Image (spheres, rainbow, N blue to C red):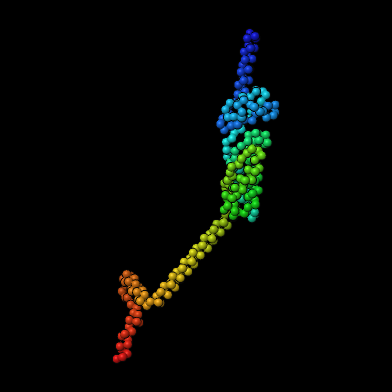
């Protein structure tokens, strides 16, 4: 009985060892294979994707995903250059472009990238004014992406984008910004009103010059005024008669 069980057990063990040597990598996965602690070369199937064959109990295969990772940067307490305390969070998009460096050069590239993002966020925003943080968000995002990408490049990690999501201001600062915005709107309203008064006075000045050059224009203005008064259905209408109309009658009276 023992002679029958032993060969069967050996066959089962060999089958398990052979199965352990075959690994299937998806399209977005790559492999780093270590043989006795060193990176193995010439593995059947390469680094993937597809079937990769390794030597069981001798080689160790580590899978690395090449897909873009979306990582939230936890809210950070930041004091801006103009001494305003804000709480800022962000999101970072990155992917592995060199799986060998991502495994060999850093212990945990996900954790390392997260820590690097947090420290860089505090450093960059601490050198910015509050107005720049609120109004020049795209410039700050580009600066963050460039700095973090330079730090993670030795790890084989490419940072494609960094976006500042929320900027939480203290209540007193929110009220100050609201008062500033209201004052700015009032200033613009006063400037627009003054500009309108200036343009109206300019037009009246031009109209007065035109009327003074042609007395008939003044009489036409009188007639237009009468039309406007008649439209209001007043009981009494005062008709201003130009002195030029009465001049012939005055001269005839003087002769007589």
Residue that sits furthest to the bottom in the current view: 256
Q: Quadrant of residue 102?
A: top right
Viewer-nearest residue: 204 or 46: 46
Q: Quadrant of residue 216?
A: bottom left
Total of numbered circles in the picture? 0
**73 and 96: which one is in front?**
96
- Image quarter where the N terminus lies is top right
Q: Name the residue located 60 percent from the left edge and 38 percent from the top edge.
A: 95
Q: From the top left corner, tell me how far across and down residue 125 is, in percent.
A: 63, 50
Q: Hey, which quadrant is residue 154 in on the image?
A: top right
Residue at image x 32%, y 75%? Answer: 237
Q: Position of residue 109 (x, y in %)?
A: 64, 37
Give the quadrant of the C terminus. Answer: bottom left
Q: Which residue is depicted at the point 59% across and 33% down? A: 65
Q: Position of residue 230 (x, y in %)?
A: 31, 71
Q: Position of residue 47 (x, y in %)?
A: 61, 30
Task: Relative to 245, say whether 178 is above or below.
Answer: above
The answer to which of 59 and 109 lies nearer the viewer is 59
Report the residue at 58% width, 45% height from top. 163
Question: Does residue 168 appear in the picture of this structure?
Answer: no
Evaluate whether residue 55 shows in this view.
Answer: yes
């Amino acid at each position: 009985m023992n002679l029958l069980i032993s060969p069967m057990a050996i066959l089962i063990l060999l089958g398990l060892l052979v199965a352990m040597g075959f690994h299937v990598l998806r399209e977005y996965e790559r492999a780093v294979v270590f043989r006795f602690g060193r990176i193995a070369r010439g593995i059947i199937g390469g680094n993937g994707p597809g079937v990769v064959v390794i030597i069981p109990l001798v080689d160790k295969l580590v899978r690395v995903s090449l897909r873009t990772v979306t990582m939230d940067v936890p809210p950070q307490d930041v004091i801006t250059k103009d001494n305003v305390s804000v709480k800022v969070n962000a999101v970072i998009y990155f992917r592995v472009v060199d799986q060998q460096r991502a495994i060999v050069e850093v212990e945990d590239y996900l954790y390392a990238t997260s820590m690097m993002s947090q420290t860089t966020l505090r450093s960059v925003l601490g050198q910015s004014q509050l107005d720049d943080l609120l109004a020049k968000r795209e410039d700050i995002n580009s600066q963050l992406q460039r700095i973090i990408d330079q730090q993670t490049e030795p790890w084989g990690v490419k940072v494609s984008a960094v976006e500042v999501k929320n900027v939480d201001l203290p209540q007193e600062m929110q009220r100050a910004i609201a008062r500033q915005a209201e004052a700015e709107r009032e200033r613009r309203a006063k400037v627009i009103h003054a500009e309108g008064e200036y343009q109206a006075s300019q037009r009246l000045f031009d109209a007065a010059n035109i009327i003074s050059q042609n007395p008939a224009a003044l009489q036409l203005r009188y007639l237009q005024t009468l039309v406007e008064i008649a439209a209001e259905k007043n009981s009494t209408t005062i008709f201003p008669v130009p002195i030029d109309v009465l001049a012939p009658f005055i001269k005839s009276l003087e002769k007589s």
